[in-house]
């Protein structure tokens, strides 16, 4: 497992490539003049995949970055990571 900031870079890269393939599939659907509802269904699937990926990154941030900062006993570091977490949750909540 290739980890730097708490997430598995290899697994994340694989998921992103799958999502990229889904987006390319939507492009092909548009080019071939597919039915709009079928395209919208695929757009929804991509959105769900991206939200799932974002949730995994958020989870990894909590279990790695925030947990490490709290365990360090350094109040400044813990405060910084806690603020980052709250900002990330706000951004994530806006997209849901």
Image (cartoon, grey):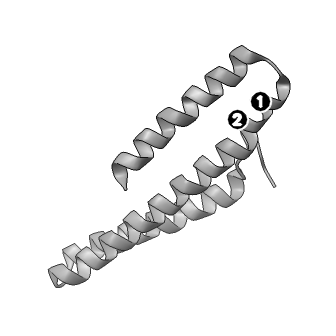
When asked about the image quadrant of residue 1, the answer is bottom right
Query: At 63% from the left edge and 56% from the top edge, which residue is drawn?
Result: 12
Local SS, label 2: helix
**Mark 2 crowdedness (10 Å alpha carbons): few <14, some 14-19, many ≥20:** many
- Left or right side of 56 for 22: left
Query: At 58% from the left edge and 63% from the top edge, which residue is drawn?
Result: 15
- x, y (%) of residue 77? 71, 19
The reply to whether residue 33 is in sight is no
Local SS, label 1: helix
Q: CA distance from mark 2 to mark 1?
A: 6 Å
- Left or right side of 41 for 81: right
Residue occupied by mark 2: 66
- x, y (%) of residue 66? 70, 35
**Contact? badges 2 and 1 (CB < 8 Å):** yes
Residue occupied by mark 1: 70
Q: Is residue 55 above or below residue 42?
A: above
Q: Is residue 40 above or below residue 50?
A: below
Query: At 53% from the left edge and 63% from the top edge, which residue is drawn?
Result: 17
- x, y (%) of residue 20? 45, 63
Q: Nearer the viewer, residue 86 or 10?
A: 86
Query: At 49% from the left edge and 42% from the top edge, which residue is drawn?
Result: 89
- Left or right side of 54 for 91: left
When asked about the image quadrant of residue 91, the answer is top left
> Which mark is drawn over residue 85?
none
The reply to whether residue 37 is in sight is yes
């Amino acid at each position: 497992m290739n980890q730097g900031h708490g997430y598995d870079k290899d697994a994340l890269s694989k998921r992103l490539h799958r999502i990229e393939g889904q987006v390319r599939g939507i492009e092909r659907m548009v080019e071939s003049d597919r039915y709009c509802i079928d395209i919208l269904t695929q757009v929804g699937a991509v959105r769900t995949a991206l939200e799932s990926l974002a949730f995994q990154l958020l989870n990894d941030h909590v279990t790695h970055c925030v947990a490490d900062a709290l365990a360090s006993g350094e109040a400044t570091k813990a405060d910084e990571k806690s603020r980052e977490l709250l900002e990330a949750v706000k951004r994530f909540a806006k997209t849901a």
